[in-house]
C-alpha cells in the first residue's frame, strides 16, 4: 500500500457552520430597496431575511438587535466604520417609536451622521424614498 500526501486545504470565501448552513459577510452587496417587511423579517432584491437588518452603502447585513434596548454604539459599529458614505441613519425601533440612546446619538453625531428614530415601518418607507433620491442614507431596522 502506497502512502499518500494529504491535500492542502483551500481557503473558502464562505464559512460552513453545519451541514447546509452557510454564513456570508453580506446578504446583498450594494444597495436595494425593501420590498416588504413584517412577520419577523424583510424582503429585498428577490431575497428574504428573518431578523433585523443593517442597510449600508456596502451591502445589506443581518443585525443581531431584536429590541430598542439593543441599539448601542457597539451594535452600530459597522455603521460607524462606513461613516464616510453615510449622511443620515434611519433607525427603525420596532413597532413603537423609542428615543435613540444619548451615547449612540453622540457617536453618530461625532461621525458626521444625522439620525432619526422611528417605527420600523416608517423607517422602511423613508429609506426607500431617500434611496430612490440617491441620497447617502443607511438604515438600522429592528424586525417586526
Image: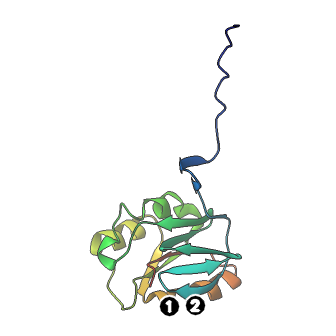
* 38 versus 44 height, above or below: below
Residue 25 has which mark?
none
Q: Is residue 23 visible?
A: no
The image quadrant that residue 21 belongs to is: bottom right
Q: In percent of the image, x 47 and y 81: which residue is there?
A: 40
Report the residue marked by disc 2: 125
Circles 1 and 2 in contact, beta carbons < 8 Å: yes
Percent position of residue 58, x then y: 63, 62
Q: Nearer the viewer, residue 55 or 16?
A: 16
Q: Is residue 86 visible?
A: yes
Total residue callouts: 2
Percent position of residue 103, x then y: 29, 69
Q: Quadrant location of the C terminus? A: bottom left
Image-based side of 120 in relation to 125, left or right: left
Image-based side of 47 in relation to 21, left or right: right
Q: Nearer the viewer, residue 29 or 15?
A: 15
Percent position of residue 38, x then y: 51, 87
Report the residue marked by disc 1: 121
Amino acid at each position: 500500500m502506497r502512502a499518500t500526501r494529504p491535500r492542502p486545504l483551500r481557503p473558502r470565501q464562505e464559512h460552513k457552520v453545519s451541514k447546509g448552513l452557510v454564513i456570508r459577510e453580506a446578504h446583498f452587496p450594494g444597495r436595494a430597496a425593501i420590498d416588504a417587511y413584517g412577520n419577523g423579517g424583510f424582503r429585498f432584491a428577490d431575497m428574504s431575511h428573518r431578523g433585523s437588518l443593517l442597510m449600508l452603502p456596502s451591502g445589506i447585513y443581518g443585525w443581531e438587535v431584536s429590541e430598542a434596548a439593543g441599539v448601542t454604539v457597539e451594535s452600530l459599529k459597522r455603521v460607524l466604520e462606513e461613516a464616510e458614505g453615510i449622511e443620515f441613519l434611519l433607525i427603525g425601533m420596532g413597532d413603537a417609536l423609542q428615543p435613540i440612546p444619548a451615547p449612540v446619538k453622540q457617536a453618530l453625531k461625532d461621525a458626521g451622521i444625522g439620525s432619526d428614530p422611528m417605527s420600523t415601518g416608517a423607517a422602511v418607507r423613508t429609506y426607500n424614498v431617500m434611496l430612490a433620491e440617491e441620497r447617502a442614507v443607511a438604515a438600522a431596522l429592528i424586525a417586526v
